Amino acid sequence: MLDRIRKVYQLGQSIWYDNIQRRLLENGELKRLIDDGQIYGITSNPSIFQKAIADSSDYDKAIQPLRFSGLTPQEIFYKLAIADIQAAADLFGNLYKTSGGRDGYVSLEVNPLLANDAEATIREAEILWRNVNRPNLMVKIPATREGLPAIRTCIAKGLNINATLVFSNERYAEVMDAYLSGLEDRLAQSLPLGKIASVASFFVSRVDSKVDGMLNQFVKEGRISEEVSGRLLGKAAIANSRLAYQLYKDVFGSERFARLKAAGARTQRPLWASTSTKNPSYSDVMYVDELIAADTVNTVPPQTLSAFQDHGTARIGIPSDPVNSHHVMEELEKMGIPMQSVTAILEEEGVAAFSKSFKDLLETLNKKVAQ
């Protein structure tokens, strides 16, 4: 069971855990997962914290003394979240050191309501970085158009950044450019590059959910046959991600990066996010099995981690030649499903979903404080 995870790590991919909750920190479960070599980092987002706080009593004891503190719900949330992130980062401290800073990171996202405000995002990222005060923190910044300059600036300031909500290859190229530009800004100031880490969170399963829905609608309207639709159902997300990996290899195999590498820079690894399977007719490990490759990360929720441990396939899943992935995109384009349009909608929906979760989270804290 555990051999599958270790084999994946030997192949060059790190499995991170898309989950955090105070109970896992207090009952030893998170420490066990780390010590057993099952997970190599953690990601969090507003939806994860909203579920953890709203659906459990884990945080009630910590909230109680804050009732009369005069703190806003948002300030209370960050007190709770930062405590969790610090505790998790400390548990990963040894892995962070022994891996030479490659793994052992814990991610905390800036307020998603700031996703379209670069300056406010930068300010909040710096506050989180100072308050968490752990070298293995990654601050998550949504990779919106306005988020790109924030990513560049924060890298230049020496923060570890998880660029999140990346759906398209066009946006992914811009994220990598922002990372490299931030490193170049540091180099121009004779600042060190060696300890800066970054990942680009490329969202996977939501692409299939959107494209499959469009294909099924086209069948209902008689625009395509079920046979044609069947050839493409469940194919777009993996094809999109495999093309992103090819982009990664091109960018970080370039002369531009070679100059930065000579100064100690690390690559910005692609992190496959949203890798739980939404369609029950698909394999529950398809977004893990099919995206294993060197120098990548896959962050998985608890159910996907358990499924992969039980019946996943630990072997390289991304072919060296992306010709089939290009073919999938060309077929979708011919049918009137341009990936650029699909991913633009998904980015907008992703920011909206995290923003709603953040608002719901603050409302939950309001109610818990009142109680």
Image (spheres, rainbow, N blue to C red):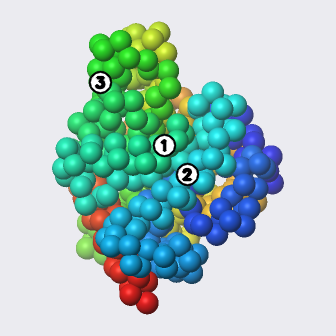
The residues tagged by marks 1 and 3 sit, at their Cα atoms, a distance apart of 25 Å
Picture layout, residue 262 above or below residue 341: above
Whether residues under marks 2 and 1 lie with C-beta atoms below 8 angstroms apart, the answer is yes
Q: Residue at x 29, y 20 (%)?
A: 185
Residue 345 visible within the image: no
The residue beneath circle 2 is: 86
Picture layout, residue 307 above or below residue 172: below
- At label 2, counting other C-alpha atoms closer than 10 Å, the crowd grade (few under 14, some 14-19, many 20 or more) is some
* Amino acid type, callout 3: Ser
The label number, if any, that marks residue 133 in the structure image = 1
Left or right: residue 117 versus residue 65 is left
Mark with earlier residue (3, 2): 2
Q: Secondary structure at mark 2?
A: helix
Whether residues under marks 3 and 2 lie with C-beta atoms below 8 angstroms apart, the answer is no
Left or right: residue 187 versus residue 306 is left
The residue beneath circle 3 is: 181
* Amino acid type, callout 1: Asn
- At label 3, counting other C-alpha atoms closer than 10 Å, the crowd grade (few under 14, some 14-19, many 20 or more) is some
**Viewer-proximal residue, 369 or 121?**
369
**Viewer-proximal residue, 366 or 317?**
366
Picture layout, residue 200 above or below residue 179: below
Q: Residue at x 70, y 31 (%)?
A: 98
